[in-house]
């Protein structure tokens, strides 16, 4: 019923009823009646999933890679089941902040496996870890001013994403110039929200922070979100801290 308000609803899923959040407005995906499969909002709750770490910097609370994994190039994964609900569309948004490693690589130049660490940022896939299918990528680039292999594809010298990513990504840099805040969070710039700094070439009017993907065929696979980053030296650790994550299916 499209006239019902947004909120928690009981649905028939798997072998027993499940309570899920349904958005009945058109602000999320452009349609009414979408089921929320993944949710994180640190302004509502400052609890992070168990394999992530809560970071509190300059009055900002965010969830990023677990601090026990920061000494290695790694990803931390959170899996969100679909509760058996079949869907053919996925839409969502991710809003957060970048931690300046000083040598960020938006997209790895030689990576063509979805199971590798191909990005500094956020990877969204569907299916189990042994059979991932790409949905969307949020990438964090080095800077935009001079040519650098760690830049976004929209900036000088930036690498193109792997073929399995295609055009299904957003990539921004937290700073237009070479990072000055080595080993610190750029809480003065909100990533992927669409409010870019003046003169940015990496922030077109493309609907960000929202993405919307239509699948070739319906599925009931769960959604996996991976926080990924690289390390160059002891004070150059890349990380992404999310303030908001919403993923819907319909």
Image: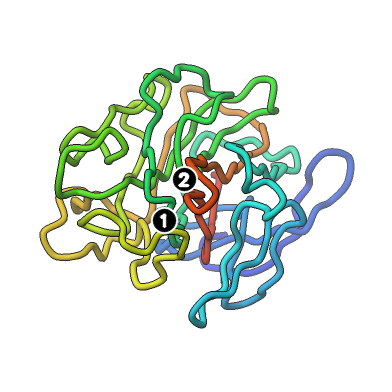
Instruction: Please name whichever residue, 99 or 226, is drawn nearer the observer in this view of the structure.
Output: 99
Under circle 1, the secondary element is: loop
Q: Residue 82 placed where, x, y %?
A: 69, 42
Q: Is residue 117 above or below residue 43?
A: above
Residue depicted at 84% across the width and 51% down the height: 17
| Label 2, residues with CA under 10 Å away: few <14, some 14-19, many ≥20 | many
Instruction: Please name whichever residue, 166 or 181, is drawn nearer the observer in this view of the structure.
Output: 181
**Quarter of the image with the C terminus in it:** top right
Residue depicted at 57% across the width and 67% down the height: 62
**Quarter of the image with the N terminus in it:** bottom right
Q: Is residue 92 above or below residue 168?
A: below
Q: CA distance from mark 1 to mark 2?
A: 12 Å
- The extreme left residue here reads 199
Say how many tags the image has: 2
Residue mark closest to the camera, 1 vs 2: 1
Disc number at residue 121? 2
Q: Is residue 220 above or below residue 189?
A: above
Q: According to the image, label 1 marks what residue?
A: 100
Q: Residue 225 placed where, x, y %?
A: 60, 43
Q: Is residue 199 above or below residue 162?
A: below
Q: Residue 42 placed where, x, y %?
A: 59, 72
Mark nearer the N terminus (1 vs 2): 1
Residue depicted at 34% across the width and 28% down the height: 161
- The extreme right residue here reads 15
Under circle 2, the secondary element is: strand
Residue depicted at 62% across the width and 52% down the height: 65
Instruction: Please name whichever residue, 61 or 130, is drawn nearer the observer in this view of the structure.
Output: 61
């Amino acid at each position: 019923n499209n006239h019902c308000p947004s909120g928690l609803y009981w649905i028939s899923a798997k072998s027993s009823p499940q309570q899920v959040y349904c958005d009945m407005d058109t602000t999320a995906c452009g349609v009414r009646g979408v089921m929320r499969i993944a949710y994180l909002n640190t302004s509502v709750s400052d609890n992070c999933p168990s394999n992530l770490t809560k970071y509190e910097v300059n009055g900002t609370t965010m969830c990023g890679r677990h601090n026990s994994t920061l000494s290695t190039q790694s990803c931390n994964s959170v899996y969100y089941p679909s509760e058996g609900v079949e869907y053919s569309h996925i839409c969502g948004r991710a809003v957060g902040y970048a931690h300046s490693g000083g040598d960020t690589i938006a997209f790895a130049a030689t990576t063509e496996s979805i199971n590798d660490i191909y990005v500094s940022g956020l990877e969204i896939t569907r299916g189990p870890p042994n059979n991932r299918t790409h949905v969307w990528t949020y990438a964090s680039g080095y800077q935009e001013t001079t040519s650098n292999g760690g830049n976004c594809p929209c900036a000088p010298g930036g690498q193109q994403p792997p073929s399995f990513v295609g055009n299904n990504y957003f990539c921004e840099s937290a700073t237009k110039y070479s990072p000055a805040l080595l080993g610190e969070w750029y809480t003065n710039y909100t990533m992927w929200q669409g409010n870019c700094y003046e003169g940015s070439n990496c922030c077109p009017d493309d609907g960000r922070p929202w993405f919307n993907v239509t699948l070739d065929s319906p599925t009931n696979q769960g959604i996996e979100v991976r926080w990924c980053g690289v390390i160059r030296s002891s004070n150059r650790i890349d990380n992404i801290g999310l303030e908001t994550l919403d993923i819907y299916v319909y």
